[in-house]
Image: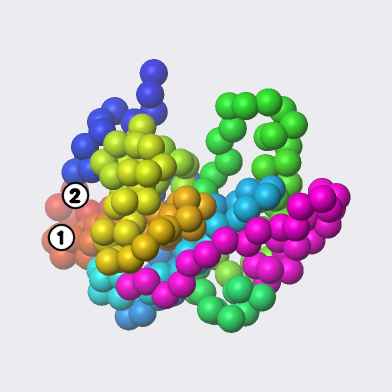
Amino acid sequence: MSRYRTRSWRAFDPGSGSVAPERFAPQERLRILGLDPGSRTTGFGVIEWRAAQWGHVAHGCVVVPKGGSLAERLKAIFESLSELIAAHEPAEVAVERVFVNRNVDSALKLGQARGAALCAVPKGLPVFEYAPRAIKLALVGSGAAEKPQVAHMVRALFGLEGRLPADAADALAVALCHAHSRGLRQLAAQSAALLPAGSGLAR
């Protein structure tokens, strides 16, 4: 049975992964780095979120050289993302949770690439994870959406022109999913704060 009972975005909880509400502190301005790790190509997307509005900052792909060993590729991912984080100074990082239904070798390589990407995140910088289905639900309204649909929605939301690499589109989608999750949780916290004490509804 599917973990998600509806495909409607109105009933979707993008934070259904594993994020505690108290980790979302209200801020006037927040820069979010979204990551879509891969053993060959790692997509990244940087957005700026403020007062329930978001803006595009940067996107692209870290493409590791062909022919190198796995250790060399992992090192390239780590070093490239370390430089990226230092350049853009995100306040939070959102990453797509690994979901692989292929062979064990592919799953192992993807997991190692993801580990290299997360190792590049400095200590103290919060990292949030979102399942691929949750990201698609947040962006498109269907957990079964295809990559072209996700890329189309990302382009439309940011008003981006031209071709958008699939891995970069996925990374921007992860960042947007996290921004949506923050907004919903802040609204919930604000609503709870307005409820009278002892009403039985406030938590």
Q: Quadrant of residue 49?
A: bottom left
Q: Position of residue 116 (x, y in %)?
A: 72, 56
Residue drawn 19% across and 48% down?
200
Q: Residue at x 18, y 55 (%)?
A: 198
The amino acid marked with disc number 1 is: Leu
The answer to whether residue 91 is above or below residue 100 is: below
Query: Dot 2, how many residues are within 10 Å of its Cα: few (below 14), some (14-19), or many (20+)?
Result: few
98 versus 118 height, above or below: above
Q: Which residue bears the numbered disc 1?
A: 195
What residue is shown with label 2? Answer: 201
Dots 1, 2 in contact, CB < 8 A: yes
Where residue 39 appears, as percent x and y from the top left, is: 69, 48
Sequence-wise first label, 1 or 2: 1
Measured as percent of width and height from the top left, residue 76 is found at: 75, 62
Percent x, y for residue 176?
37, 59
Q: Residue at x 58, y 27 (%)?
A: 101
Bounds of the magenta span?
Answer: 55-82
Q: Which mark is residue 12?
A: none
- At label 2, the amino acid type is Leu
In the rendered view, does 97 fall on the left or right side of 180?
A: right
124 and 6: which is toward the camera:
6
The correct choice, above or below, for 20 with respect to 107 in the image is: below
